[in-house]
Amino acid sequence: MSSPSCFKRCLAIFASDLSYHSKRPLVAVWAFVMILTAWGLSSGTMQIASGDQTVGGTRAYITSEFAVSMQLTILTLLFHGFFVSVLAGMAIIQDEDWKLTELLLATPLRPWEYVWGKFAAVLATALGVLGIQLVAMMILYHLIPVAQTAEIRGVFSVWNYVKPAIVFAAPTMVFLAGLALGVGAWSRRPVMVFLLPVAIVLFVTTFLWQWSPSWLDPALERLLEAVDPAGYRWLNERFLKVDRGVAFYNTAAVPFDAWETVNRVMFVLLGLGCAGLAARGVSARVRGRAGAAWFRRKGRVSILVEDRDTHPIEPLQSLGMAVKRPGFWRGAWTVAHGELLELRSSAGLYLFIPLLFIQTISVALLDVGFLDTPFLVTSTRFAVRSLIPLSLCLAMLFVFYAADTIDRERTTRLASFASAYPIRTSSILLGKLAGLCVIATVVVLAVALGGVIAMFVQGRITPNLGIFALYWGVILVPTVLVWIAFLFAVHGLAQSRYAVYAAGTAVLLFTGYRLLTGQINWVGNWPMWDAVSASDISVFELDRIAVVLSRVGVLGLAIFLGRVAVQAYRRREIDAARLLGRTNARGVLLELLRLLPWAAAPIVAAGWLGWLVHSGREGGVAKKSDKDYWRRNVATFTDARTPDLVHVELNLALFPQRSGYQSRGTYELVNHDEKPFRQVLLTGGRHWRRLSWTLDGKDVVPGNRAGLYVFTPPGGTLKPGERMVIGFRHEGEFPAGIGESAARAREFILPSSVVITGFEPTIAPVLGFREDIGIDDENRSEAREYPDDFHEGRTDTFLGARYPFTTRITIEGPADFTLNSVGIKRSDTVVNERRTVVWESDHPVELWNVIAGRYVVDRKERTAIYHDKRHSYNIPEMHASLEAALKYYSEWFYPYPWRELKLSEFPNLASYAQGFPTNITFSEGIGFLTRSTPEIHAPFEITAHEAAHQWWGNIISPARGPGGAFLNEGISHFSTILLVEQVHGLAARIDFCKRLEASYAQARRADSERSLAKVQGERPDDTTTIYDKGGWVCWMLLNHLGRERMLLGIHEYFKRYHANPDHPTVHDLLAVLRGHASDPAAFDAFTHQWFYVVAVPEYRLSDAKKSQTGTRFVVTARIQNVKTGAMPVEIAVVRGERFDAKGMANPAYQEARTTVTLGAGETKDLRVECSFEPERIVVDPDAKVLQLERKAAQLKF
Amino acid sequence: MLSIRDLVKVYPGSTTALAGVSLDVSEGVFGLLGPNGAGKTTLMRVLAGVLEATSGTAELDGVSIVDHPERIRERTGYLPQDFGFLPHLSGERMLRYLLRLKGVRSPQGEKELCRALLDRVHLEDAAKRKVKTYSGGMRQRLGIAQAVAGDPRLIIVDEPTAGLDPEERLRFYRLLSELAQDRIVILSTHIVEDVAVLCPRFVVIRQGRLVADTSPSEARRALEGAIHEGAVDALEFNRFVADPSRRVTQAYLVEGRNRVRIYQTTGDLPPGFRTVAPTLEDAYMILIKTGSLPGSSRAGEGATP
């Protein structure tokens, strides 16, 4: 017999391994996961952010080459990367565990044949799964697509799938497989193999794909692209980040450049190189050079000399053994101990725990809130923010480990005899559950440690572990218990670990789907995902009964499922014939009846909770009531005019401990119109009890149209100029009932604090018919389209009343409460532990609110900040901002008409800030718990923005309709830009502008973006247009007009429109400013470009050269505007850094500038002379022109 | 007393593993001998309470094993044919874990008891090593240690000597003999020597039925004068074995020549053959091939006392 050739031997290894891999459950799970992912993606969950269906135009396809490339780059690293690493890394280790390596290598098989055969088998398996994924994508995207996603499917082209697979997915797989094989062969430690993909995924996803500051050097950018094994950074930075328009993504092929081609080839070679190193490693070990110590260690095992002494042995009876059935707890403890001893050897845990640890630290530190400002990590915020990742990761972990644990006796064949042991089945299961709970505890402790480290890193807050224990104890413990019990029960009933995988995955997917689609409620939200808010002030106050019932129900369910698991756990193999005999209707019924008492607690809790949800503030009863309101009134009263408020008199008694209130007051109304009113409409609250009304002081019963109260004025009509007074009195509790799915509310009366606004009929009626009440998916209509000339004539207010009115608000509450409202405080008295405060408007207002809580106050001459005593971190910075805003906005825009400006904190049960006149309210997550750094003055910026609403929103409320939101929010951002520069200097202003610009560049959608004069706020990218672009454009307008002219124009605008019932539009603002322009034609060109159409430049520098003539240097370069718009832009040649770390000007910095104006697509040659040797060319060094891809608009010599 | 009546076990697919086994077993080592697939392991598993029988009864001292297996678990020690351990635990930790699960106590404490048991099975030197590094024989010995732990009333050992070297096998025989003083020990095996050495009484099971219930000496006595041994030429061997007038009970090589033992009660002996003393192996082979021994009852009948 002749020995086979080396190729045949290699092929034999390949075939044998491929056959083995193809039957492995791991590979089946892998393929299943990829098919599931393809199914998930088919609904458009991972789409290029371009285009929008609300525009009616084309959306970005999920089937284009770009989209598939994006999906594959991400999925290959996240999913394939993990599986392929495990498969390749364990290939050699597993053979050694099975003692196969030495056996195989004792044959003519050479180490390199062995390793390359294994490597090829892993790659073939991986490519097979990739193929399955691609086929699944093609089928699910094209053949059986989700019905609602027709607009995100393009024409089918196999190449759209195959090319990205070849170019992106396959090289990544080769690299990771080779690397893992090398690590496995050299380290021979499974932990290293498991940690490898985690480390790569963490590095790549948290840093390589994320870190892209605007100041990043292009060379460094190229380097970062080069080291990305997935190729996503290149794709994202070059093509996806700056929206190129939906047509481009849908039709263009990914234009690979030499750089990316080298990247892909390099990673293939690296993978092959690592596989070669693995072969060398095995070869060296076989020859005994490397790894000799390991073999010696292994050898010790096999050559142990067993000492066979023949010393006399005492009879067995002398041991005095006796058996007593282990008690329930003792048995459980024993099993738990054994489980832990096994679990600690489980390599997967070393994967998940560091992953969670690092993820939680990074999530905590990267958590951003309002205006993209980073959060201060507090114990409460960290505990609550960690709940979803923790419970999700634990749930996923236990899908595998619960199956492993419950199946351990069978897989290890310990059950062969241990099933005959006297220990109770319930003890076995409890012990297994306890073992898993210990794992959960370790995971939770690792996460807690991550949180503590994050808090120490930021250095502002002392961790409070009690808060962790409270939130995680209340929410996480029942969740973990019910999940394990569920998985145990599934295993018991199905007797299959695959059933556990399938049921576990299905339940998680279903719960996640229900949550994401807004269909979940308290009853179905067993893990309480996204159900509570992080608040230091209000801890489990809102909807406490829902939390309690949810947890009781879940614990009850855990016990019930535990009982089912015990019942179904098989220590004895069931006889099929006997089982059939037992399975009759009576037997099954008896079995169910036996289980019924165990099911009582979850059934009662779920039923009770369901009833509370149904009758709660967002439940079926409330929805029906709202719908009735809409149905009965929409046809009659849409756009119905109302008289205007002249004065609001309100007496409010608050009983926060029981969320109660008593309210009475009057609305004095006047007819400012030219026509008489025959009816006056007031919208009341559903929760109002013992309601009574008066009209001009006399009792009256108005018409009640499902909560819309219709009053007939005295004498039948309210003639122009006539007044009437409507009085009301009622009481109740608010919030009325629990929410549908989460403890969140924008307004509330709770033991810790009270937030009430005049926007909602909470304690006082709202004037007129509310078109937004009772709107749901059934009756929701498209956003109103306004005609182009909507600004002609009188336009109604965006928010609040048409005419300013006066207020006198008397609030009574607990003595330890501070009770704030609009205006100035007239009196503050305490009688019988009850405080009474009277607030009067010292200047008319268009909005009012009430906020109360247990505050400490930081007071200055005209400003005050009321806050929770624990939240004093940012008070100096916020107060500096508030004072500066009051001073400078008064100077720049219009004198502040009220005497003082207050800012009060409320619990984070809703995350918003609102600038009511004199009485700004901030959720605790906004400003108070914002992280301030030397570079980013986040609390200052947020406060400056909200303070600006005193002017932009209160002194003038813009008109409802297109551009209205911009006049509120965009100009408040502009005000912030001015204030940041005024207080913190040029460097801070440039940095702030760049952040706004980066936010705009990333969030805009080129195809759906609307002009500032048209933007209304209902499209996904409107927010960035309104805020970021709006602020920037006003800033550019200021530079265009000149600061003085701009501020004069704004001053005139305030004079003209303050207290004017004709609320201003963008056209009105620009008309006023145009009067101050030195060159109206240039002004028109500017405003056309930035307000009436969508244009934004993107500059590219090229061919930069510098030459020296004597002592002077000449720089030449070419600049092109590759996008749209035409703006004069400065180009600077510079030497040194402009600012130091503190933002102060660097005296060593030198620069020379020139200015060019480039239209869309235009190119110009630059020539700049300077007396120093320049280091860089920078376009727009002062951040005065909004542009895309600013970091590409600079070059280094 | 262990009492089995009409025990039937049918696996799905109508495979009858036990076809009505009835048996009474009292203290001492009781052998269950049979070829692979005869139903030995099924019977052992039913008696250990890890497999539900299709019908019939089995009682240990009046307690039904079939209906209430949990009631006899404290009194049972079981060493199955195929078993394993938690691979990452050391031998000592593993045994301690099993002792706790079983509820075994001893005046000298768990640790000492564990050490003593490991000593009994000669694993004291390997106590600290992980079980996954144990050889097959060492695992078998650890299995024996857990089976005998707790002084059980009924010890069921299924193919216990598989994988043991001769010395360990001898030690195990001694251990079982010691245990059998006042307990019921059921030894299932296809190794006749085990039964010959240990069992004063044994049954032979074939295709789910008991074909003999006897003692080694009885079985040998039944073949007295009917077993003959001689040498057969290699070229003649196949023809010799195929001759229906005689039954070959054993055939083996001695110095390269075929030595053959035959069972023959009538007619002339083949040339060179002489009558020898019968062994238990001869009896077993006759029972397996014919279902009975001369002078004893036939299959199924003789098994019922």
Image: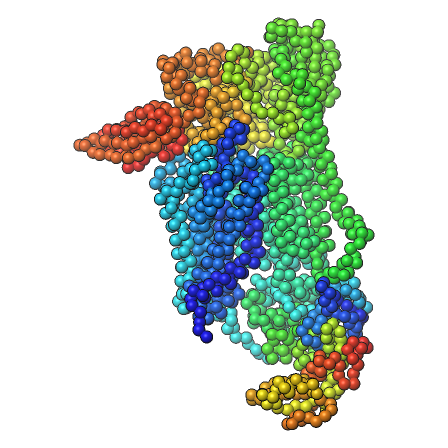
Is residue A782 at all visible to an observer of this figure? yes
Image position, residue A505 (x, y; %): 61, 47
Q: Is residue A445 left or right of residue B201?
A: left
Residue A23's image quarter?
Answer: bottom right
Residues A210 and A810: in front is A210
Closer to the camera in the image, A42 or A556 = A42
Q: How many marks?
A: 0
Is residue A276 toward the left or the right of residue A316 in the image? left
| Residue A528 percent coordinates (x, y) | 63, 40
Tell me what residue is drawn at x 53 percent, y 56 percent. Answer: A347
The one nearer the camera, A475 or A74, is A74
Location of the C terminus of chain A by quadrant is top left
The answer to whether residue B288 is left or right of residue A794 is right
How is the structure coloured here? rainbow
- A194 is higher (above) or lower (below) than A161: below
Residue at screen point 57% across, 46% down: A36
A69 above or below B155?
Answer: above
Q: Please state the horizontal and vertical placement of residue A111, each as a whole percent of the image.
A: 43, 65
In terms of image quadrants, where is residue A888? Answer: top left
* Residue B135, picture quadrant: bottom right
Tell me the residue at 62%/74% (across/down).
B162
Q: Position of residue A406 (x, y in %)?
A: 64, 56
Left or right of A216, for residue A378: right
For the point 38% across and 50% down, the residue is A266
Q: Is residue A577 shown above or below A798?
A: below
Q: Is residue A682 visible?
A: no
